[in-house]
Image (spheres, coloured by chain):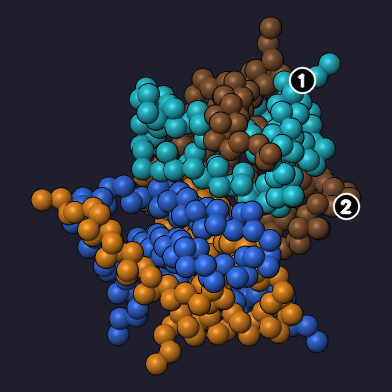
Chain colours: A brown, B cyan, C orange, D blue
Amino acid sequence: MTTEIETLAERLKHFADARDWEKFHTPKNLAIALSVEVSELAEIFQWLTPEESAGVMESVKNADAVKDELADVMIYLTRIASILGVDLIKEANAKIDRNEVRFPPTP
Amino acid sequence: MTTEIETLAERLKHFADARDWEKFHTPKNLAIALSVEVSELAEIFQWLTPEESAGVMESVKNADAVKDELADVMIYLTRIASILGVDLIKEANAKIDRNEVRFPPTP
Amino acid sequence: MTTEIETLAERLKHFADARDWEKFHTPKNLAIALSVEVSELAEIFQWLTPEESAGVMESVKNADAVKDELADVMIYLTRIASILGVDLIKEANAKIDRNEVRFPPTP
Amino acid sequence: MTTEIETLAERLKHFADARDWEKFHTPKNLAIALSVEVSELAEIFQWLTPEESAGVMESVKNADAVKDELADVMIYLTRIASILGVDLIKEANAKIDRNEVRFPPTP
């Protein structure tokens, strides 16, 4: 069975292949690209109060910008994980397992 | 049907609830946390040549560090998208649709 | 005697005052802004080879972009240090003192 | 006359020379290193309220961490500007000149 992230990774590989962009997609370059996209997301929030940040999706303009930047982050995260052979869902769950030991729940 | 990302988002919500951490999880704070984790990933590659970066998973120590940082990025990306009500797979595919028009394939 | 960074910090304080922007300039917001500007600098280099990155100033367009982003980074770094009462030159030298012990020179 | 930033740049060049680190100091690698250090600064503020962030220097532990990270940011910013032949003070002032036109003061 192919998961939704694997399907996305396949589409991204095909997209890069069709444009001869695979040569640019070293893990190092993709890590920088991921960092750039995350900063574009953070930029939306930089001058907002915590309350304004919680209501960011109420403005259509901000909501579209947030969706666009989250899409870019998801794209580069999927691409770098795919190239490195890392299963994001498996590793995220393994990390939460470790965090459950490291940070016991509030009694 | 619940997708694998939705299942992860549920687990993360429960994890935050059980520790009374929801108050910290404003979109603004999560965007900063995401940025911090992406930089910890980039740090692994900062002094590597492109060739060394391509072989990063051959060292067990580096491979473990990469998996750990990718897990943290996936966790915060899933968490912020969940809080903002954004479907990462849908938005990523919509963005690739737009990119296919913006960047035509090499003939 | 006033140093060149103190003079810049004074100008930035006056600039923020005149626009009623001081309320936005919490250390937290300025740290995010600094991070956003550094990513705009990194974006210029993201797909370049090490050799291309070394020659980035040979293109007038790239050189102007680099100067513009370095200016923004210097502005936000000076501003956050000024608000926090930190002397950048003194702290940088103290850090190099510590690094000289931590990383002995190659024999 | 040599400015305080030029003096710092000279010290950093000598430090890299003495350790045979100049080969690592491409503009691209230094941009990544700068980004990593800025994120370590942002990490100090990530879960703080705006009010807590304004009082960050009241805790000796936080104050030392802030000074240490600001030092690292200043070091890499000075180093990359030095390698690219960019005068940070001059470019920052030129940028403020442009911003004064772009953002007129509040009446």
> Which callout, 2 or 1, points to the residue nearer the camera?
1
Q: How many marks?
A: 2
- As shown in the figure, which amino acid type bears the numbered disc 2? Ser
Residue A80 seen in this snapshot: no
Left or right of B17 in this view: D72: left
Left or right of C75 in this view: A6: right
Query: Which label belongs to residue C90?
Result: none
Q: Quadrant of residue A70?
A: top right
Q: Position of residue D7 (x, y in %)?
A: 30, 74
Give the crowd class for mark 1: few <14, some 14-19, many >=20 residues within 10 Å. Answer: few
Q: Position of residue C64 (x, y in %)?
A: 52, 63
Q: Residue at x 80, y 87 (%)?
A: D107
Give the crowd class for mark 2: few <14, some 14-19, many >=20 residues within 10 Å. Answer: few
Q: Residue at x 47, y 83 (%)?
A: C6
In the depicted structure, whether residue A34 falls above or below residue C90: above
Residue at the left extreme?
A: C107
Q: Residue at x 38, y 74 (%)?
A: C89
Tag 1, which chain?
Answer: B
Residue D51 seen in this snapshot: yes
Residue at the bottom extreme?
A: C1
Q: Quadrant of residue B104?
A: top right
Whole-angstrom CA distance, mark 2 to mark 1, is 28 Å
User: Camera-side residue: C4 or D93?
Assistant: C4
Q: In terms of secondary structure, where does tag 2 sit?
A: loop
State whether discs 2 and 1 lie on one chain: no
Tag 2, which chain?
Answer: A
Image quadrant for the N terminus of chain A? top right
Residue under pointer 1: B3
Q: Residue at x 88, y 52 (%)?
A: A59
Image quadrant for the C terminus of chain A? top right
Q: In terms of secondary structure, where does tag 1 sit?
A: loop
Residue under pointer 2: A59
